[in-house]
Amino acid sequence: MIKSVSVRDFSMNASAVVQWLSAEVDGPESIEAAEVVHVREADLVNISCSAKGNPDPKITWSRFYPSYNRTSGILSEGSGIARLVLKSARKTDTALYLCEASNEVNAPPPMATKLIVLQPATEFQEVMSGISSWAAVGSSGHLPCQVRAAPKPTIMWTTSDGMQLQSGEKYTLQEPKLVDQLVLWSSALEVHHVGREDYGPYTCTADNGIGRVTITRTLNPPSRPHPPTHFSIINVTSTSVTLSWTPNFGGGRPQGYTLRYRAVEKTQYQVVDISGGETAGTTLTNLQPNTAYIFTIQAKNDQGLSAYVSPPITATMHGESLMT
């Protein structure tokens, strides 16, 4: 059976098609979300992010990890709007969160929201623990102090006998600066025209009204460096070996290294000088295939040499591949 269609019905359907074809299709041009959100520990976190577009854009929240230059997986998502919800905020939730919006037309740059959980001042445990500060007589010494705190802390420096220091000709007290744009604050004490009486411990006290932390930093006279740590073999071929180590800042600051090595069956060492106290590896070439070698290393600076790493490490070069 064929259904008859009137001219009026046809006109109405054609008009609807034209309206659909002429509808504006666009992508999100901007994203709306708070730039900074402060909360107390155990507070409920509820941050909205929205963007307009046709069709409605997909909205997602993720956490950004600057140390790895990557984001987490999607924490929440929605159409046109999404909410980042944390039922009970913790200090470890302090981070940069990214809101992204996209549809098939456009994907503008993400919007960054800083979530800062209020927290007392605590010492920042540096990656290179045991860093010592030293300065020669007549030079300037630098004593760092880094803490995590929100809100911003005030920092006070005192000597071992409790005298509070002020900026002037002898000392410079650096105002705390925000390092990570979140809660990591860095300050330092500069000791000018160092005399022997200036050597010893200094105290950095950080207080932000929620809590206080006291950190001791010691200004030492120049000394020989300590041997590097974690001396190890990374790769071996038939004629080369790649070695690595971790610079040791527990003593005087290293300015370079001396690497010595020999074949096991020989008694005379060969020596390689390596510049740069922060250098952490090198590759030795022109070694003999099928030969076992002994390797060890020491640090050096203007004050002298450290002991060699003991015991030394050994490696056997691979055999040469035969061409067929």
Image (spheres, grey):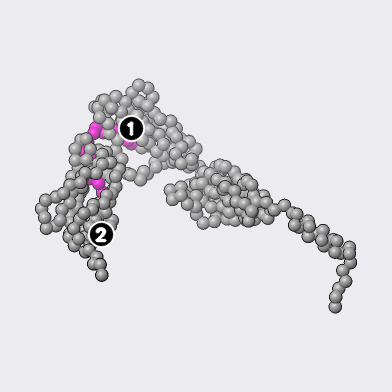
In screen coordinates, is 6 left or right of 237? right
Q: Residue at x 45, y 35 (%)?
A: 177
Q: How many labels, in total?
A: 2
Quadrant of the rendering where the C terminus is positioned? bottom left
Q: Residue at x 24, y 32 (%)?
A: 221
Q: Residue at x 23, y 60 (%)?
A: 238
Q: Amino acid at mark 2?
A: Thr
- Residue 55 sits above or below residue 139 on the image: below
> Between residues 268 and 246, which one lies in front from this camera angle?
268
Quadrant of the rendering where the N terminus is positioned? bottom right
**Magenta stretch containing residue 113, yes or no?**
no
Start and end of the magenta stretch?
216-229
- Label 2 crowd (10 A; few <14 / some 14-19 / many >=20): some
The part of the image, by quadrant, that contains residue 286 is: bottom left
Query: Would you say residue 148 is visible in this rendering?
Result: yes
* Residue 53, horizontal then vertical, whole percent: 67, 51
Q: CA distance from mark 1 to mark 2?
A: 44 Å
Q: Amino acid at mark 1?
A: His
In screen coordinates, is 102 left or right of 295? right
Which of label 1 and label 2 is nearer to you? Answer: 2
What secondary structure is found at the residue carrying circle 2? loop
- Residue 201 sits above or below residue 15 on the image: above
In the rendered structure, find residue 142 and report the number of the disc placed on it: 1
In screen coordinates, is 49 left or right of 222? right
- Which residue was labeled with disc 2? 237
In screen coordinates, is 72 left or right of 259? right
